[in-house]
Image (cartoon, helix red, strand yellow):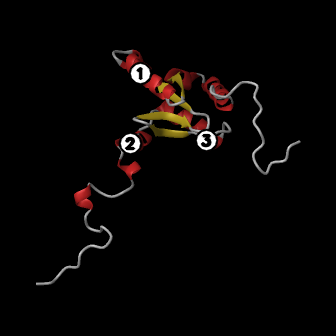
């Protein structure tokens, strides 16, 4: 009978711990976000084409986990979340769930902008203009305040 060496540095005990990967990859929101990225709706795909690659001057992420939720689009620098709402958001318990979600995200410092799928399909320019305005001047910045230059920048 052959003698087996014990595993090194925890090798081989993944089945006992529930699999490998970092803690963030083990969160169910991460898996949900990945699935939602593969199954985006037409309005989400069209808006993503306008937001990707910092076309608005800010980096947006699509189907991004934020706490226990997955935001349709998120700009972390501006603390801005964009949600595209279809007709289902007007029915049943959806309005109450959306309000609770918005309140929780607002408590974390995010502004939630809700746009209808119809607006994305019929008025993309207006939606993009609104998001550009929100990303340029997020709600939590003091109005009229000029930011100080970053270290290494010349003051003119």
Residue that appears at 39% across and 55% down:
22
Q: Which mark is residue 100?
A: 1
Q: Secondary structure at mark 1?
A: helix
Task: Name the image quarter holding the N terminus.
Answer: bottom left
Residue visible at 78% across and 42% down in the picture: 149
When the figure is inspected, residue 101 is found, relative to residue 34, above or below; the finding is: above
Mark 1 closeness class: few <14, some 14–19, many ≥20 residues within 10 Å:
few
Where is residue 136 drawn, in percent x and y?
68, 31
Question: For the view shown, which residue lies furthest in the right direction?
Answer: 156
Who is closer to the viewer here, 100 or 49? 100
Label 2 with label 1: CB-CB less than 8 Å: no
2 vs 3, front mark = 3
Q: Which is more toward the observer, 71 or 153?
A: 153
Which residue is disc 3 drawn over?
59
Q: CA distance from mark 3 to mark 1?
A: 26 Å
Cα gap from disc 2 to disc 1, whole angstroms: 24 Å
Residue 97 picture quarter: top left
Can you tell which quarter of the image residue 52 is in?
Answer: top right
Residue 147: percent from the left, percent from the top? Answer: 75, 36
Cβ atoms at labels 2 and 3 below 8 Å apart: no
Where residue 107 sits: x, y (%)? 49, 27
Question: Residue at horizontal 66%, vertical 36%?
Answer: 56
- Residue drawn at 63 percent across, 27 percent down: 140
Q: Where is residue 62 drawn, in percent x and y?
A: 50, 39
């Amino acid at each position: 009978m052959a003698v087996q060496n014990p595993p090194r540095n925890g090798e081989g005990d993944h089945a006992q711990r529930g699999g490998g990967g970092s803690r963030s990859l083990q969160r169910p929101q991460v898996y949900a976000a990945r699935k939602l990225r593969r199954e985006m709706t037409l309005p989400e795909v069209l808006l993503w084409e306008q937001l990707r690659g910092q076309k608005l001057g800010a980096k947006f992420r699509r189907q991004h986990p934020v706490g226990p939720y997955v935001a349709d689009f998120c700009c972390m620098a501006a603390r801005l979340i964009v949600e595209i709402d279809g007709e289902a958001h007007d029915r049943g318990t959806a309005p109450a769930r959306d309000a609770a979600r918005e309140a929780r995200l607002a408590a974390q410092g995010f502004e939630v902008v809700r746009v209808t799928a119809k607006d994305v399909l019929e008025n993309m320019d207006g939606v993009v203009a609104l998001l550009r305005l929100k990303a340029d001047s997020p709600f939590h910045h003091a109005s009229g305040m000029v930011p100080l230059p970053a270290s290494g920048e010349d003051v003119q």
